[in-house]
Image: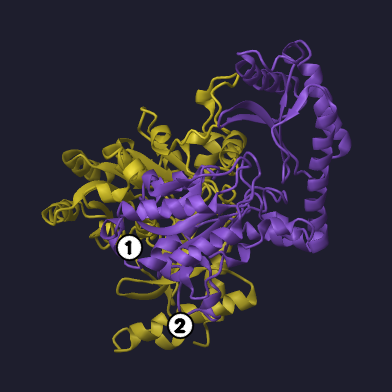
Chain colours: A yellow, B purple
Amino acid sequence: MYAVNLARYQRYPDCKRRGLRALPPLALFTSKECHYSIKKGAAFLGLGTDSVRVVKADERGKMIPEDLERQISLAEAEGAVPFLVCATSGTTVLGAFDPLEAIADVCQRHGLWMHVDAAWGGSVLLSQTHRNLLDGIQRADSVAWNPHKLLTAGLQCSALLLQDTSNLLKHCHGSQASYLFQQDKFYDVALDTGDKVVQCGRRVDCLKLWLMWKAQGGQGLERRVDQAFALARYLVEEIKKREGFVLVMEPEFVNVCFWFVPPSLRGKQESPDYSERLAKVAPILKERMVKEGSMMIGYQPHGTRGNFFRMVVANPALTRADMDFLLNELERLGQDL
Amino acid sequence: MYAVNLARYQRYPDCKRRGLRALPPLALFTSKECHYSIKKGAAFLGLGTDSVRVVKADERGKMIPEDLERQISLAEAEGAVPFLVCATSGTTVLGAFDPLEAIADVCQRHGLWMHVDAAWGGSVLLSQTHRNLLDGIQRADSVAWNPHKLLTAGLQCSALLLQDTSNLLKHCHGSQASYLFQQDKFYDVALDTGDKVVQCGRRVDCLKLWLMWKAQGGQGLERRVDQAFALARYLVEEIKKREGFVLVMEPEFVNVCFWFVPPSLRGKQESPDYSERLAKVAPILKERMVKEGSMMIGYQPHGTRGNFFRMVVANPALTRADMDFLLNELERLGQDL
């Protein structure tokens, strides 16, 4: 929401005072794999969910830049003014990374604000081995990053990084409340960040990141990221070895998506109700693991795919033994299905 | 922002999808003593700060209902559609309580959503002695309340209370993300509150209030509120006894606003530069107390009044000795001025 608000303000500074009714209809673009907060934010900001144009993604969940071009032309033909593209680095379900260089080219060509929702995948930048997944992010106008996700900082710890050097945050959000942002303080009042943000009374969430970074060092955080990748890889290889497990796809991140196929469904892929019956397995196992108290693994449907498990490997305390336990436990809980 | 978004959605459900461009120009009303978040929120929500119509307040900082009526007629005459009134219970600087019954009458007459910003003063409802300050709040459509202020719950702890029983929050904010709000869970999914709110990953801030309430009981919290009022009253009486202190006004809440008049300015009220020189005193004393490390008391200008101190008595650990220290310390720090 910050990024969208900044982008529209930069283009139409007048909207702070006069509102959206003074503007032409705006259009922003994101892939069908984007986080649901994009549409939610568009509604909240008064743009309306219709202003969000959904760009196609490939079978791995990555935005297709050619379709982005097409959607931009389509929006313009309908009289809307494109102003922002939201790329995703680390989609929620599949963990996909959009092709940022190609998207940046499109943004540059059309003069659009490039936002990267790297809430989930942004921490990968700390890894020399894997950071190439985010190639092109340096061209973004804004990046959202949640150290409370992959780096496991305490909830909440969210950062918005901006390319801007014109004090856009201050211009866009400043309200000069005279009882708070006095100009006659004895220090440089440019250091007061309060007037740059939307919230007033709020926690100093950045302190958690600073402390963690100081304590772990860049290398310590890099190890966490690399270890998560390695453990996800281990889980994938173990899944391939076991009869009752089917990968949804080879992951490129630490989202390991798979089906557990219970004994009664094995070898029945050709039967007409196979998918329907398989989709009912995950909710049953989820109920059993919750009641047992042994694990908490999410599941969801996705496009035409029925419910599958999504094991997100992030906690640095996890070990290979935990991955083995996870698979054994699913087998145990589902042996009668 | 939640309340404004809910109010406009209730009147124009279509705006969630189509945005504000599909609506007539909207107008909301609040007093000139309101919190700065109202205008900030109006800009963020795409309404624009011009949509906020400022209603006059009396000399004690309370909204004048007759002027509210006038502003509503004025807005309508200009072609705007009034939809919300934001009353304040406990203004930031003076601690004023708007006359809620009279404001509720106006809202009822015009069919407007009545929101009460009781972020600061809402906790007064816990006091049998002082709760009459909020008479009429039961007629509000929505109330914002921050237990992290007067009740000193840990930052952040903010509540939005709604009169609505139609599940408006769900309709307004729901986005049915299929990977999160699965309908095939084994318990009643109506218990999932996640889809009702704007944020996704967030702390369970309500737990702090629940724990505090359990630990202190209603009477314990009432004592905190009553004690804050009593201590503020003590400070006021002490201020009246001392030569170098002048009350801005008799407070009705725990905001004690006063000037410290240094020796060189005493008895000089008639001199033409008195106000100007007095306004420079608070910033100097603030610098001195910060560098000394002895206190932190805010100051601000207010309307035509130059800088004055605002001692907000909230911390339940404060005692009369602390109030005496405060006054002694100001005298000590300002004796050469």
Q: Assess disc 2: are there few (<14), some (14-19) or many (≥20) residues with their C-alpha within 10 Å of its C-alpha.
A: some
Which dot marks residue B233? none
Residue B177 found in image quarter: bottom left
Between A109 and A257, the residue placed more toward the observer is: A109
Any part of residue A32 in sight: no
Disc 1 element: helix
Amino acid type at mark 2: Pro
Who's the residue at 16% across and 52% down the image? Answer: A66
Up-down relation of residue A76 to residue B232 (above or below): below
Q: Estimate the x, y position of residue A177 in percent, counting from the top left.
A: 52, 35
Report whether B147 appears left or right of A232: right
Q: Chain of mark 1?
A: B
* Mark 1, residue position: B15
Q: Estimate the x, y position of residue B282 in percent, counting from the top left.
A: 67, 22
Amino acid type at mark 1: Cys
Residue B162 found in image quarter: bottom right
Up-down relation of residue A291 to residue A226 (above or below): below
* Mark 2, residue position: A262
Q: Chain of mark 2?
A: A
Report whether B109 appears left or right of B323: left
Tag in front: 1 or 2: 1
Who's the residue at 32% across and 40% down the image? Answer: A9
Disc 2 element: loop
Q: How many marks?
A: 2
